[in-house]
Amino acid sequence: MTVTEYGKPLQPTPTAIPGLVVWDLPVHGDSRGWFKENWQREKMTAAGLPDFGPVQNNVSFNDAVGTTRGIHAEPWDKWVSVATGRVFGAWVDLREGPTFGTVFTTELDPSKAIFVPRGVGNSYQTLEPDTAYSYLVNDHWSAEAKYTFLNLADETAAIAWPIPLDRAELSAKDLAHPRLAEVRPVPAKKILVIGANGQLGRALQAEYGDDGTVEYTDRATLDITSPDFETARHWRDYDVIINAAAYTAVDRAETPAGRVDAWAANVTGVAALSRVATANGITLVHVSSDYVFDGTQEGAYSEDAAICPLGVYGQTKAAGDALVAGVPRHYVVRTSWVIGEGGNFVRTMASLAERGIDPKVVADQVGRLTFTDEIARGIRHLLTVGAPYGTYNLTGSGEAASWADIARDVYRLTGHDADRVSPVSTDEYFASANGPISPRPRNSVLDLAKIRATGFEPQPVDVGLERYIGSLDA
């Protein structure tokens, strides 16, 4: 075996197949032989290799020159290298999309490796005897795993095998694989929306429409608090999980039973989601709340402001946020005063106005409304542009207002006298309440500079409110 070159720097070379990248590996040799770091997570991810989380290492030893294997597209990513010998490698993109059928070939020796993304067909032919072909994968082998195959002799791919296939060593199975025209492309990994029947879930369904890569579940079909949640799906089939499920009954959370339910949904379930996302390289999108703050700060809260929840609901949301922050690929989308389908403050005020009721409304809590279609649009934006992982505030834009201000706007927009709304303090409003009341942050204004820096411009609250009132009329 001859190493082509000693001492090359660690360096990637992209190919015409998206995600398929050839890597030069530093090999150090002397009279005793040679040494290389075949997989070094810290150095290689810093140089641009995806942090793909390998869990299994396989070695294929090949006695004879001309041993030919493939073309197999497995449901996992691979880091392919050669320990001894030399191979001619051929890769064909078998994924859905414009590069389906694209071919790339090169030789691999111990000084080269290649990262092969899920869905790209992998094959090789040995050029030296006693060749040891090694590959790391990020899922455990399973007899139930679904492969996609392409015939080694496919005329469309037209791979120029150094040793003609009629003189090569190959299996009967590989000879029988289908031609490219008969291959069903490997679908993209899916986006999973959890809590699809809630306010945000319904907005996400409207945002993504009939996109076949998005799967929707509700509590009846996938319960994040269930003991078997972590084995409920083949999680490597998913690229993104959007958690639109949450316990949001802030006052009921202050009761003994509500406290249990809030912690189960907002913490225990989120912990399971975080473990699944971390173990399977999934991007986890989680929706947070202004209730993680105590509301005593002057001015808008930035994403890195000190967490200080006042009540049980806020405590569970803060705990869930901390769990999600430990997931390597995560977005925590922090929002406030959410309005969507179903019962909410705006609908209640519109109904009171129509029924001739003159309400007393809290005037010492300030913030901005956030419409669920804006949250859905913002989540899709972060995923589409590949924004840096982390926490992002997302609310409507414009001037902050109190609940009383918003109530007056609702009365005005529905054709009623805004002066029918009487402002009161929080303490006055809840003075006659029966049962526990969750403390509310008096300042819920969130700073929007970070998400704006990604190219997303939040909709002004007054525009969103007018549109929402119009939808109620319709």
Image (spheres, rainbow, N blue to C red):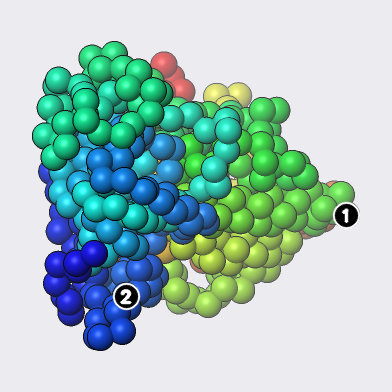
Mark 1 to mark 2 CA distance (whole Å): 59 Å
Where is mark 1, residue-wise?
256
- Up/down of 411 relative to 46, above or below: above
Quadrant in which the N terminus appears: bottom left
Q: Nearer the viewer, mark 1 or mark 2?
A: 2
Q: With 294 as the anchor, is 193 left or right in this view?
A: left
* Residue appearing at x 14%, y 67% in the figure: 4
Residue 329 appears in the picture as rendered: yes
- Up/down of 365 relative to 383, above or below: below
Quadrant in which the C terminus appears: top left
Q: Which mark is residue 60?
A: none
Q: With 241 as the anchor, is 84 left or right in this view?
A: left
* Residue appearing at x 36%, y 48% in the figure: 63
Image quadrant in which you'd find residue 381: top left
User: Amino acid under label 1?
Assistant: Pro
The picture places residue 466, in percent across and down from the top left corner, at 35, 34
The picture places residue 77, in percent across and down from the top left corner, at 39, 47
User: Amino acid under label 2?
Assistant: Lys
Image quadrant in which you'd find residue 32: bottom left
- Up/down of 330 relative to 104, above or below: below
Q: Which mark is residue 36?
A: 2
The residue nearer to you, when weighing 379 against 258, is: 379
The picture places residue 326, in percent across and down from the top left corner, at 54, 66
* Residue appearing at x 75%, y 51% in the figure: 264
Report crowding for label 1: few under 14, some 14 to 19, many 20 or more residues within 10 A (C-alpha): few
